[in-house]
Amino acid sequence: MSDESSFAPATEGARTPWPEPGKVVLETRGLVRDLGSEAVKTRILHGIDLTIREGEFLSLTGFSGSGKSTLLYLLGALDRPTSGEVSIDGVEIGALDDDDRATLRGEKLGFVFQFHFLLPEFTVLENVMLPMKRRGARAQTAIESRAREVVESLGLGELAGRRPNQLSGGQQQRVSIARAVANDPRIVLADEPTGNLDSRNGLIVMDVFERLAREQRITIVMVTHERSFASRTSRQLVMKDGRIVEDLDQR
Amino acid sequence: MSRVVFFIALRQLWDRKLLNGIAVCGVALGVLTLIGINGIMQGFQQKFLSNILRISPHVTLFDRQLRPQAPILARASEGFVVTDVHHESPADRILRISRPAEIVEALEAMDEVVAASKLLVGSAVISRGSQQYPVEVRGIEPARQDRVTPIASYLLQGNYRTLEASPDAIVLGSGVASRLGAKVGDVIVCGSSLGQRLNLKIVGIFEAAIPPVDNTRVYVTLRNAQALLGRPDTVGRIELKLREPDAAQVVTARLEEMFGYDGESWQETNANFLALFKQQNSIIDFVVGAILAVGGFGVLAIQIMIVLQKTRDIAILRSVGFHRRDILSCFLLQGAVISLLGAFVGDVSGHYLIQALGKLKTKQEGLVKSETFLVFDDPRFYWYGFGFALVVGLLASLIPAVRGSRVEPVDVLRGQLG
Ligand SMILES: Nc1ncnc2c1ncn2[C@@H]1O[C@H](COP(=O)(O)OP(=O)(O)O)[C@@H](O)[C@H]1O
Ligand SMILES: [Mg+2]
């Protein structure tokens, strides 16, 4: 696709040193999560302690079933831990009710999933605008110009009026990144965002994330299976059987 | 509710035009049925009632006494004698209203009463040539009676005044006239078992548009009826027109109390019809309710299907900051729009249906005689349709909406991603 090739990959990014991380934005203490029925409960996470700072680009790797997604949902206030605590920007989310957690997700977090979850009835631009409209922090016209700006910065300008089913997988994934980013999140959580893409589109997505982390100091936690992508992040976490077994600062 | 929820709801509705269109049609059909059936039923009932109210007096006082006259003995020794009245034979009592002129005067002095008139009613046989036909003879005071039941206004042919002016005049119901093949100016013979045979000249033919009346009733003067039926100087009943027809039952009870004669309101006189209408109406309410409910189930089925298909989208919306309440109102809004559209379509098509039916030429002759299909275009039915559609639509979308609002994004994500 022509628009994808027009997007110049920031290949030199890997060599540039990462800036010093800022203050703590995400913190967990003794995070435990059990899943399954009452009768058969399995401990998926065995007490995760994690401190993540502003501007960090984390990769989370590990075998399938090691608990990466489970941890990500807890970090994203989508799930409640069995015990332990998650705090986002200093707010303990265990104390928040359902509405407050939804509001917090809208204001501080952005999500990107393996299967680009876009609303099929809305155009690219509308998909990007929906979270901003719900949040209502910007005026209507500002919402639209912000959405255009983000969509264009991701090389999707010409596709703004299209519906998701008219886009390729890579384009759709960039739209969901645009949606996650447009609302000025503090943290973007991505669960295997390149897992469903060919290597070229995977690279493009990776470049986008790196640029966001470097230029806009958005904190990113990305679950991935690709060693090469993990090595490009500022910090590598490796999980095994519900524990973090490696925490490698790559600055 | 935030505007973006509105936007999402409408867009999702529009994107499933076919499904939601079917739901709208279901609701519209219910509303259409409500308006259509009620229009037809009310058309018939209203016409019948208005015809009945023209032809039948609001209240009739009969010659049946409610309180038997106390025997002489009891009157003489007040209170001391217990009388035990065994059943009287019909001959024991002369059925008549005593001092009717005074009663009429007293009645007309009452505020509630517009007019009162004396009658004698009985059965007779009319013969014309070799034909004989049984009729109900009503002896009336023509001018007074016209103020109680406006016979002159439904006279087809002839002149009502002649009934009063001429000593041997008769007015026939249209059915009676056509059965006898008689027309205005013809002379017929009228007689009964107890009285004289009279030669009467037809001076008018009336049609009340109620076949049972038109086929049996004839009017003569009170005097002629008394001679015909062999009951000289007798008044058998007094008929009244009231200011408020709806108050007839209350007034009747009071008149019975005052005069001691058995009274009957028009509602009592037509009790069997009114009861029939009531039953008809409850059957209609049931049928219409059922059809509206079916429309509601249509909305329910389609909305549940949509909510199930939309769990992924709900999960997205919830993860980007939408509250449970937003999801709830999104689906309720869709239900409301479906039912509003359904109500609108139903109301509009119901209106055209009623109009078209009203123009339909069908001869009916049963309880009501009419050249066209009788319909009643009551604005209330449109509002009922609107209200019921909205209630049904909202109730039906409540279950899917609540279901949708309970979707936990993390469940969807786990299901999808393992
Ligand atoms: N609803 C559930 N009930 C029980 N076990 C579950 C459920 N969902 C996931 N699991 C288990 O939790 C473990 C961790 O899953 P997940 O966090 O998705 O791993 P990853 O993302 O690292 O592949 C897996 O072994 C999986 O089988
Ligand atoms: Mg996973």
Image (cartoon, coloured by chain):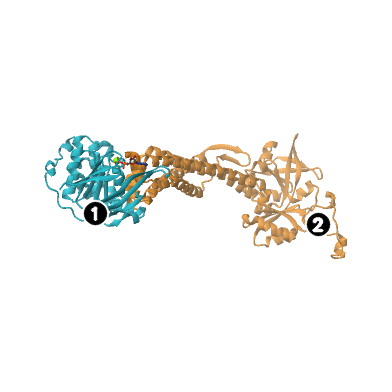
Q: Is residue A51 above or below residue B416?
A: below
The hue in which chain A appears in the rendered picture of the protein: cyan
Q: Which residue is mark 1?
A: A25
> Which image quadrant is residue B190 in?
top right
Task: Report ligand 1 position as a quadrant.
Answer: top left
Where is residue B215? Give x, y as percent: 68, 40
Observer-side mark, 2 or 1, equals: 1
Q: Secondary structure at mark 2?
A: loop
Q: Is residue B352 above or below residue A133?
A: above
Q: Secondary structure at mark 1?
A: strand
> Which image quadrant is residue A156 in?
top left
Near mark 1 (Cα within 10 A), the count class, few <14, some 14-19 or many ≥20, is many
Disc assigned to residue B73: none
**Front-lying residue, A146 or A184:** A184
Quadrant containing the C terminus of chain B is top left
Near mark 2 (Cα within 10 A), the count class, few <14, some 14-19 or many ≥20, is few
The hue in which chain B appears in the rendered picture of the protein: orange
Chain letter for mark 2: B
Q: Amino acid at mark 1?
A: Val
Q: Count the labels in the image.
A: 2
> Which image quadrant is residue A137 in?
bottom left
Q: Which residue is mark 2?
A: B68
Report whether B326 appears left or right of B297: left
**Residues behind callouts 2 and 1 on a single chain:** no
